[in-house]
Amino acid sequence: MTSTTFDPTSTATSLAAAYTASRQQLLTTQTTAATATSTALTKLQSALTAFDTALTGLSGSATTSVLTNSATLGDTSIGTATATAAATAGTYAFFVKQLASANQVAYSNLSSVAASGSGTLGVSLAGGGSFTVTLAAADTDGNGTLTPVEMAAAINSASGNGSLVTASVITVGGQSQMVLTAGATGADSAITLDTSGVGDAGLAASLGAGSQLVAAKDAIVYLGTEATGVELRQASNTFDSIGGVSITFKKAMAASDAPVTLKVATDNTATATKLQTFVDAYNTLNNVLDGLTDTGDVANKKAAGAFADDSAVRALRTRLASTIRDNIGGVTLASYGVGADRYGVLSLDQTKLSARLATNPSGLDTLLGNTGITTKSGVLGSIHTALDAWTGTSGQIKNRQAGVTKLQTSLTTRQSTLDTQYNNAYARYLAQFTQLQTLQAQMTQTTNLFDALFSNNSSN
């Protein structure tokens, strides 16, 4: 007698899988969709945030503008210059008669003195700053002797100094010299020491006989020529006399030198670079939105994007495309050379941009506007508002992610329940078919016994 044999383990596995198949397929589909949505939301958040950051860098205000001006000195050895968008184009002449300098004084013949009774030292600047140094407390190693190095350290750390004066010690021919340097330039940086409180007569005499290394001087610059120009005198070598322009002079000129020329002009190349940043950022976002809303191609086995059927994401894309075509003050981005092709991809025509900047440079900042927290304006303001509805603290992405997270938690719980049902079914089927296998083996053994018995009787 023959019998059908089977494996209880594989049989139980197949039956348990069949028992949960339809529910498992549904859960797998839902879990895959939830994961894809979560990934897509993260990708969208990243793309929108990156684009918003690019907008902030272009946002026009009193201190920030997409427009860029250049400031160039005819002789860069005389100084350097920079210009903001607020600068007015023009040509200026300067004659640098004198640079500002910080006072520096050396005190020689210094030697160690007894710390006890060394008294106090007063330090003051011509501009009014002053402080007192307690020399008696400057013996940091506690050996009872005040050295020039300890004295310099006491000056640097004195309460009220605040970098008004810096002290250092140099050794020349075996003799220590202390050098005091004012922390700022200008005539007001002249250093004066009050030695009336110094207890040691020799130390007081040395500190009272300083040798000036660098005089305290203001910068003297003429707008125009030295003979007929307007004198500009100040403590710093950096001048902001021309609105939106900062010039730092670094060399005085000889009396016979011709004034150095400063040219302030619109830098169309730099402005184009900034505007290209906007174009590139928009195209990057547009590419991401393309992928997320792609309807797919069944014939070519191309899957649809995660938001192919999402009307809200499509509405966002439509709004952005519409906003970059806004007409503000009679001009559009297209007026300044920013155009879009049939697929919404932007490009910049620098020739057209330069031509428009020549006739209406301020119009570009007005058109772009700003993305300020309290006030928004222009194209950038409208785009920022649209993006904030998605990326803000209570925006769509955060709310959607919360919903997806909740769904994923529910799916995990359901999967756990289904796993338990599968395991229970598997255990039940395994027990049943193991028992059946045992019964089948017993029946086979009995059948074989009878076959052998009747076979022997037949022989007799």
Image: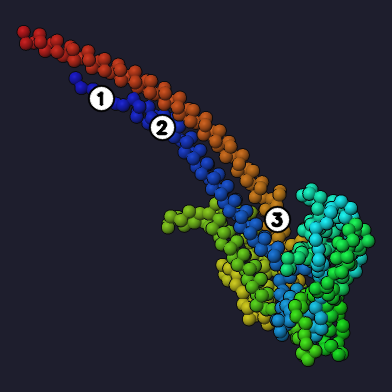
Instruction: Name the disc covering residue 90, or none.
Output: none
Which one is in front, 213 or 197? 197
Residue 315 position, x and y percent, is: 64, 58
Q: Where is residue 131 in the image (x, y as percent from the top left)?
A: 89, 59
Q: Local crowd at mark 1 within 10 Å, few (<14), some, or many (≥20)?
A: few
Residue located beneath label 1 in the image: 4
Image coords of residue 382 (percent x, y):
72, 62
Q: What secondary structure is marked by label 1? A: loop
**Can residue 242 be seen from the camera position used here?**
no
Q: Do the residues labelled 2 and 3 touch (CB within 8 Å)?
A: no
Label 2 is placed on what type of residue? Ala
x and y percentages locating residue 403 in the rendered image: 63, 43
Amino acid type shown at disc 1: Thr
- Spatial CA span between label 2 and label 3: 48 Å
Q: Which of 65 and 29 is in front in this view?
A: 65
Point 64% across, 73% down: residue: 273
Query: Circle 2 sits in a helix, a strand or a loop, which is it?
Result: helix
Local secondary structure at mark 3: helix
Q: How crowded is mark 3: few (under 14 residues within 10 Å), some or many (20 or more)?
A: some
Q: Tell me the residue that label 3 is attached to.
A: 388
Marks 1/3: CA–CA distance: 69 Å
Question: Residue at label 2?
Answer: 18
